[in-house]
Amino acid sequence: MVVSQPWAFVALLSGIISVGVATWLYRWVNRQDAGSERAQEVASWIREGAQTYLRRLYMALTLVAAVLGIIIAIVFSFDIENLGMDMATVDPVRGITMALAFVVGAVCSAIAGYMGMSVAVSANVRSAVAANESINRAFRVAFYAGSVMGLAMVGLAVVGMSVIYLMTGDPEIILGFSFGASALALLAKAGGGIYTKTADIAADLVGKVEVGIPEDDPRNPAVVADNVGDNVGDVAGMGADIFDSYVASTVAAMLLGASLFIHDSALQARYTLLPLVLCTLGIAASLIGIRFVRVGQSGKPGRALNSGTIITCALFAAMATALVLVGGYNLGVLWATLAGLVTGVVIGFTSDYYTSSNFRPVLETAEVSGSGSALNIITGFSYGLISVVPSILGIAIATLLSYYLSELSGISGIYGVSISAVGMLSVSGMIVSSDAYGPIVDNARGIAEMAGMSRDVIDRTDVLDAAGNTAKAITKGFAISAAALTVLALFAAYAEVVGARGVQLSISLRNPIVIAGVLLGAATPPLFSALTMLSVTHNAFDMIGEIRRQFDEHPGILAGTEAPDYAACVGLAAQGALTSLVFPAFLAMVLPILIGIILGPEALGGFLGGSIFTGVIFALLMSNAGGLWDNAKKFIETGEFGGPGSDAHKAGVVGDTVGDPFKDTAGPSLNTLITVMSLVSSLFAPIIAAFHLF
Amino acid sequence: MVVSQPWAFVALLSGIISVGVATWLYRWVNRQDAGSERAQEVASWIREGAQTYLRRLYMALTLVAAVLGIIIAIVFSFDIENLGMDMATVDPVRGITMALAFVVGAVCSAIAGYMGMSVAVSANVRSAVAANESINRAFRVAFYAGSVMGLAMVGLAVVGMSVIYLMTGDPEIILGFSFGASALALLAKAGGGIYTKTADIAADLVGKVEVGIPEDDPRNPAVVADNVGDNVGDVAGMGADIFDSYVASTVAAMLLGASLFIHDSALQARYTLLPLVLCTLGIAASLIGIRFVRVGQSGKPGRALNSGTIITCALFAAMATALVLVGGYNLGVLWATLAGLVTGVVIGFTSDYYTSSNFRPVLETAEVSGSGSALNIITGFSYGLISVVPSILGIAIATLLSYYLSELSGISGIYGVSISAVGMLSVSGMIVSSDAYGPIVDNARGIAEMAGMSRDVIDRTDVLDAAGNTAKAITKGFAISAAALTVLALFAAYAEVVGARGVQLSISLRNPIVIAGVLLGAATPPLFSALTMLSVTHNAFDMIGEIRRQFDEHPGILAGTEAPDYAACVGLAAQGALTSLVFPAFLAMVLPILIGIILGPEALGGFLGGSIFTGVIFALLMSNAGGLWDNAKKFIETGEFGGPGSDAHKAGVVGDTVGDPFKDTAGPSLNTLITVMSLVSSLFAPIIAAFHLF
């Protein structure tokens, strides 16, 4: 079926424009002054390290994608519903289309991540150099570089989805695209998270603790791996993560839209396409919003980022209202969109309360640090647990509002829930832009230090760096709640797909097989977190061995007369991260199918439900507690409670180090984990249903 | 209705025998040599401190029980099902009966806790004195004292339940008894947990860290509060905790039994009474098993405790088999009982893997401690997360086995699940006896130190103490999994009670109101944990202030010429713990009713489900991680990885201190929290259903 709806072309066009602007900004950043030879040399280490890692990652992923693609091609060539009745119904075209969609999804996600990474490793040094001139100029370089990531991501996603829709008209094929994007996101995010913290912990433990050289000292063989890690984990990882939620929420809504109005194909197509239209509006709003992000004479980069986000949201809300009213869509869609958007922003700013040094949680954690590391950990962990509550309340309220307001307006409530996820994520272009800004200025600071720039420059990059932290906290809260709504929609889509295959799914908590499924599902996110965190400590010990070896065998390194072998550390961290992914990837992609086949589709429904509930809770806990410990340490470093070097500071460092794998490894991968599990279940639902019917 | 089934009288008799043996053992313990004047003086501080705490606790609880009792009396005087149709159906007798059952439940729980506490504070010094003679003798004093707790608890529970059943024949009244027991258990457990760790942390921070006096030094004003805490939290708290699961599982099974065979009242009564019969067999098995716990010439107290547990389980299994075969019960009951019993024991021993220094988790945590506190925390926390998986698997398997084997045998599957919980808990008499032994020998060690007994005695009490740790780990795993099965059964009972009121409950995860309920329920256990842990740190800071004040105003204390004011610290800890309970108690007792009334009975079903899933996961995580850190520290103290005083040891102490509120405050209260929430929902289900029907 070929669909020729004008809106699909508009969506395609908006995607192309978004990618075009990203490319233009990419060139603009590259045209900026790259500074002295020394600065360029330092930057080149990081760039080469990042490329080494990405090369290895993408080689591994190509293999994974090829294997999965072949499996998908074979499985979807069979018309499973009719299997056993008529073996002749083999349809290789559908199988190959699905596999292609999968591969294209993975490739788009990879390209977005790659563009974000390469502009980041090019912008870091340029932002540091620009800081010589003014904060304003340095901010612009970093933020526009961040926008490359944001715009490339939403653009590629919309191009991919609209092309597939224009060619096939079948949202189930887009599910393949989404699975490709998410599978890659999971590996990129979890792998990047393990990589970055392996390098960070190893560099700190040998560098700062054992031999007593400062952070970011170029004599430390792991320093490049550490700086690469910031790019790998934070830029490529976060980009892939939002890419995946963005696509998944749109697909879930399209799938649910396709199940509406099945007797009126024009209306059906309208509501199937609506999520893509909302994405288009979001791109337009983001493009305008990005223009408004400027640091004036006040020099407050944090305020510039926040006002950009607010302007984008307001613009999007206005456009969505106009669309629904003028376009004659059901009003419920508007309520759902606004419910999602407002909740996303509110949750984002709430998570700032738990992680910013202006409020009680961080202050109390910093204060008790004077009485030892244990109290720092207990207090930070407790507030991390409490921080779960407002977000969960927000998600519950958004779910109920979007469901019942849609039902009251006469449209499917569960479609409303999926639209609220789309509404929340529609402004991702802007959100990711301010998020990607963070690691770029963090790196700029590192380069300024390593290249021996002036104290003024370092101070300016400090100001820029601090502004990135709030943006990061907001994005994380936003990403997690968006993922929660997305997976709730996917969960409904799963039931829909299974239901369409004749298995009436009652995922009742009064059914013991569902309870068993929920119990197993609920245990999966904690297990996944633990595995990734243990990978960090195990890999860090391997790397500590390597650093010690270099110091022992080449005494010139510490003397400053010999260059350390940075590549060895980068390679070790990359290899370790990829090897550590095998079992977590199994949990994400194979376990749901096994549960579905062995215990049946109702147990799988319970399994998905259980994994969503604990996945969201652990993601919030770990991200917020990690951010809280980080900022408590930074607060002590400003001279409070004894300041740097005091007992309180030592305790703060312990908390920060515990928080590192919490917030950068385990926490953020959990969104992607639950998305992948939901997608894999929806995609393979026909097969699971077929097994069950036999 | 008055029931005159012979088995109810047998149950009553077995309960009376159990209480009788407990009383006899209590006297036996008190007849043992209480040692020198100095030892008696030290012991009297702890005894008086414990009495101060208990007096305050029970005064507060009397107030709470009175208020709740009056509410229950009023609410249950109305025949709610017919409310609105015929206002004349007021039945004050039922209301008062229910309130009386509630108060009797609370009183029984309190008496069991009080007996356990008073024998513990009398046995500690006697066990230390007996250690002068031999390990064997000291072990016997401590274990028989533990048995007082175990036997009093199961005895009082069975007496209470069988008397109410004989008098009313109505399991819903026993629900009131169970709620009384659980409400008291929650306050005793959470309050005791806050109390004990407040004293522990404050005593350590001022004593060991600030003024540098050893642990258990009598100059420390908080030392008595610390030793009292071991009794309050571990003996009274754990006793109340198991008491509550024991009663709740029996009641849930009786309620579900009463809903079977509604057209054959003889059969119905048989299966309603069966849970009480299983309790009777469990008491008999425990009484015999306790006789077999002896330390022979080998002097291995750990082995003696384990073999006692195994003998009791084997005896109980044999008796249950005989009962079902001879008594002509449905075979499904037997399978369910055995599934529960075996799972309980297997989970108990599994949790030993994660917390014993013979296996990798503790060893790796101890090893990485050499590289700092942060790695100790990350590693311990990660293994804590992993430790959740085997128990969750066990609970899922026990649920499925007991459900489907019962269904296959032709009896209600959900009744089977409830019977498996009863089967697991039936041997509680023995389990609690070995568990209560732990804090008694821990205290004996403290008294030996404080009273200046010989090195030989202290070494012997060390051996006794180490044996208590495994028993404790087993009990905790056992208590949590039993609570999980119990609340699953209660959950089914809730649906049953609501269903009987004409509200057909479909707790489907496809319903957004259920999802909202699950999300809120899932967030409650983390919030509860955080609140209790923050209470510990806040109260500890208050107590630190008091200790410093005493040292400042009375310099004679540190010089050893003046006695510190122990009572002030005890009072402060007690007051702080009780005040901190207000909001957690609200979460447990009022929130479920509010959810049910505002969002409806289906949302409440989801809420209970969500709280069970995360409650079990957090309970396992916190108990196991806490035990793991404790033993990693102890392992380093044996001289490994640098031994006492090394950097590894310092990191180990940090982990242990973090683990303290995990394992002794937050973790173990979570069982009781979910039990209380389930009971309150079942008890008030008729009211919630009535609101919903209006």
Image (cartoon, coloured by chain):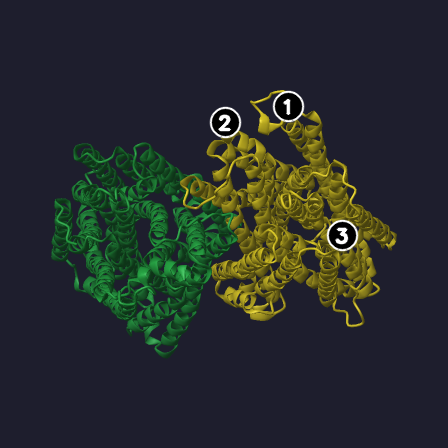
Chain colours: A yellow, B green
* Chain at tag 2: A
Where in the figure is residue B470, as x and y percent of width and height? 32, 45
Where in the figure is residue B487, as x and y percent of width and height? 35, 50
Q: Nearer the viewer, mark 2 or mark 3?
A: 2
Rounded to the nearest angstrom, the CA distance separating label 1 from label 2 is: 17 Å
Rounded to the nearest angstrom, the CA distance separating label 3 from label 1 is: 38 Å
Rounded to the nearest angstrom, the CA distance separating label 2 from label 3 is: 43 Å
* Residue extending furthest toward the bottom: B553
Q: Are marks 2 and 3 on the same chain?
A: yes
Is label 3 in contact with label 1 (beta carbons under 8 Å)? no
Where in the figure is residue A598, as x and y percent of width and height? 48, 31
Where in the figure is residue B238, as x and y percent of width and height? 30, 54
Secondary structure beneath disc 3?
helix
Q: Is residue A307 visible?
A: yes
Q: Are marks 1 and 2 on the same chain?
A: yes
* Chain at tag 3: A
Which residue is the site of mark 2? A694
Secondary structure beneath disc 2?
loop
Q: Are marks 3 and 1 on the same chain?
A: yes
Q: Is residue A199 above or below residue B600?
A: above
Q: Residues within 10 Å of mark 3 (few under 14, many from 20)?
A: many
Is label 1 in contact with label 2 (beta carbons under 8 Å)? no
Q: Residues within 10 Å of mark 1 (few under 14, many from 20)?
A: some
Which residue is the site of mark 3? A280
Q: How many tags in the picture? A: 3
Q: Nearer the viewer, mark 3 or mark 1?
A: 1
Q: Amino acid at mark 1?
A: Thr
- Where residue A512 sits, quadrant-wise, is top left
Is B658 in front, or is A72?
A: A72
Q: Amino acid at mark 3?
A: Thr
Residue A89 badge? 1
